[in-house]
Image: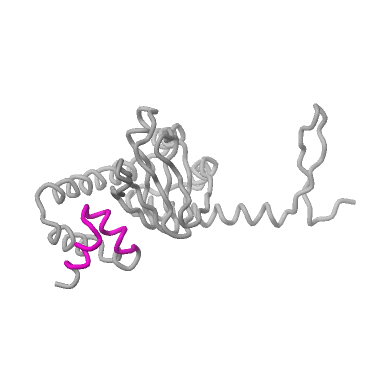
Amino acid sequence: MQSDKYAVIGKQWSGVAKPMIIKKEKLSESGQILDEAALCLFNFISDFSEIPLSESEKEHINLNLKVKTLRRGDYLLQEGDICRYHWFVVKGAIRMLSINVSCREYVLAFRTENNWVTESESLSQQSPSRYYIEAMERTQVLQLNANCMETLRNDIPAWAEMLQKHEYEQAIVTQRRINSVINMTAEERYRDMLISYPYYEQRFSQHMLAAYLGIQPETLCRIRKN
């Protein structure tokens, strides 16, 4: 008799279904990880939407999610790739950056817990990306492909409201970022970053912060001393 500790899953091999034995503990552990990560996303949705999620809607969302765990330096996207996904950061930190012909890095954005990240231009136009999306520490994300994102937007009112409000907030963040680059001095950009994102100094190195501010690390060091 098959032990209760094991599950049998049909596996195709040369046209004949053969049983593949997988420990049930492994299956339930994987499901638990997804459930815990999805709970973070559900809480995020409730923060952005006044419409409650039903249990069937949560299940609908869960079926479209995939958990990915990244080590420091792992990429979700590299220059030249075509972006096909949205990622929700459950734990950890990510940066979106470009590297010019002189190998100098420019960080467009950092994303920490409870944030979405994607490469919008590549995703919408299905064109090669000009950017990298890289984990800056051990990071867990929920991955969702673009078609599923739109399906959930159409099927679940709370999801649609969350996306609308989040996209609006991100548009404001982008506008402020552009304004800081155009109109602020290096020191003003640094002070503005400390006000808007005080935790950046604890999460990211001087080199990364300098790349985000568009200055040399030595310049940032002098600003910090003043």
Which residues are drawn in magenta?
204-223
Quadrant location of residue 199? bottom left
Q: Give the camera-side residue of 224 and 135.
A: 224
Main SS, magenta residues: helix
| Coordinates of residue 31 in the picture (x, y in percent) | 61, 52
Q: Look at 22% across and 49% down and name the residue there.
A: 173
Picture layout, residue 78 above or below residue 44: above
Q: Look at 41% across and 55% down and name the residue there.
A: 43
Q: Give the camera-side residue of 219 and 55.
A: 219
Identity of the residue furthest to the right in this view: 1
Verify whether residue 210 appears in magenta.
yes
| Coordinates of residue 133 in the picture (x, y in percent) | 40, 46
Quadrant location of residue 205? bottom left
| Coordinates of residue 82 in the picture (x, y in percent) | 43, 33
Identity of the residue furthest to the front in this view: 102
Q: Look at 57% across and 56% down and name the residue there.
A: 33
Q: Look at 28% across and 59% down and name the residue there.
A: 209
